[in-house]
């Protein structure tokens, strides 16, 4: 009946979860089910998720007894996957209406690809403020400069997830679980594609900036080091390994300024 399982780790997103779920109901492709796992929220997030699960047969809500992190939380969601495709979604974002239709069409017409994602529109309490661009056909050399696929708007063959054992659960991979996942998938022979259009809206406000802790920058450097080593990239690529640490030392105001400038948006 369903072709897509949407996996969503939720944490203290009571105020935004309604909008996120409603964007799924607005999809032109209706062949999806949603698995939400609450990661120890202290607000009414789980109660809201459970209310949806009680009303709709294609929605499942589970919870962790304590906060485990996104990698372990998404692995719990993966246990409920019985479809050919897995899509990601965050509880404070919005999927644009044709997202699933376009991603599903690509994967069904291109069996040699396991991953498809696309561009994102960034928004905050004042509205849309920027739009990211992604490399159409990422190669291994691109991995060292950052994650080659936006995680939240991705759709992936379930078999590709099974082949690499899902997300690696390790505190040293928190906040970079997606980058590490793509690295594992490419090592296993997968390849991916980025649709050259925006299919998703990501909330990027002061709360999102506050979540970017320095220890997560170190985790990013660690993954980039693995990529240089295991993809046998040229030695010069190691300069990109230390870049996340340098960025992590920047004052918040300067990081925000550079981040928005990179998205070609003024202050």
Image: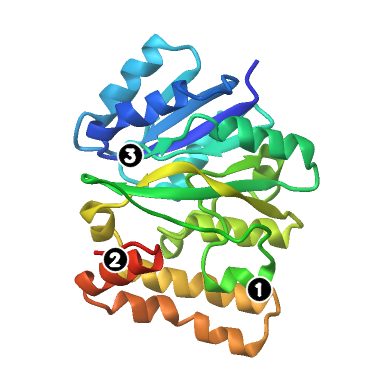
**First of labels 3, 1 by sequence position:** 3
Between tags 3 and 2, which lies in front? 3
Asked if residue 82 is positioned above or below residue 227 in the image, the reply reads above
Secondary structure type for disc 3 = loop
Which mark, by number, is residue 92?
3
Kindly report the distance in space between the C-alpha atoms of the residues bearing marks 3 and 2: 19 Å
**First of labels 3, 2 by sequence position:** 3
Secondary structure type for disc 2 = loop
- Say which residue label 1 marks: 141
Q: Nearer the viewer, residue 148 or 11?
A: 148
Secondary structure type for disc 1 = helix
The quadrant in which residue 40 appears is top left
Tell me which residue sits at (72%, 39%) in the image. Answer: 107
Q: Is residue 146 in view?
A: yes
Asked if residue 187 is positioned above or below residue 169 in the image, the reply reads below
The quadrant in which residue 94 appears is top left
Tell me which residue sits at (27%, 69%) in the image. Answer: 257
User: Residue 55's spot in the image, x, y percent?
Assistant: 38, 10
Tell me which residue sits at (35%, 77%) in the image. Answer: 247
Q: Is residue 69 in view?
A: no
- Say which residue label 2 marks: 213
The quarter of the picture where the C terminus appears is bottom left
Q: Nearer the viewer, residue 26 or 150?
A: 26
User: Residue 25's spot in the image, x, y percent?
Assistant: 45, 21
């Amino acid at each position: 009946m369903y072709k897509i399982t949407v996996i969503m780790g939720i944490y203290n997103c009571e105020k935004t979860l309604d909008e996120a779920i409603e964007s799924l109901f607005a999809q032109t492709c209706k062949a999806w089910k949603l698995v939400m796992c609450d990661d120890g929220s202290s607000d009414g997030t789980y109660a809201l998720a459970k209310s949806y699960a009680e009303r709709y047969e294609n929605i499942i809500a589970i919870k962790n007894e304590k906060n485990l992190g996104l990698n372990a939380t998404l692995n719990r969601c993966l246990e409920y996957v019985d479809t050919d495709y897995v899509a990601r979604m965050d509880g404070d974002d919005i999927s644009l209406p044709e997202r699933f239709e376009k991603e599903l069409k690509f994967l069904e017409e291109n069996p040699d690809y396991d991953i498809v994602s696309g561009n994102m529109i960034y928004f905050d309490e004042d509205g849309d403020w920027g739009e990211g661009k992604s490399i159409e056909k990422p190669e291994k050399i691109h991995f060292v400069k950052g994650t080659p696929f936006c995680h939240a708007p991705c759709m992936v063959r379930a078999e590709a997830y099974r082949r690499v054992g899902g997300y690696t659960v390790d505190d040293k991979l928190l906040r970079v679980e997606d980058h590490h996942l793509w690295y594992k998938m490419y090592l296993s022979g997968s390849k991916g594609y980025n649709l050259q259009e925006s299919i998703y809206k990501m909330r990027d406000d002061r709360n999102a900036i506050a979540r970017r802790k320095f220890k997560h920058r170190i985790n990013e450097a660690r993954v980039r080091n693995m990529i240089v080593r295991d993809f046998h990239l040229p030695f010069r690529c190691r300069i990109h390994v230390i870049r996340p640490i340098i960025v992590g030392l920047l004052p918040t105001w300067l990081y925000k300024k550079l981040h928005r400038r990179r998205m070609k948006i003024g202050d």
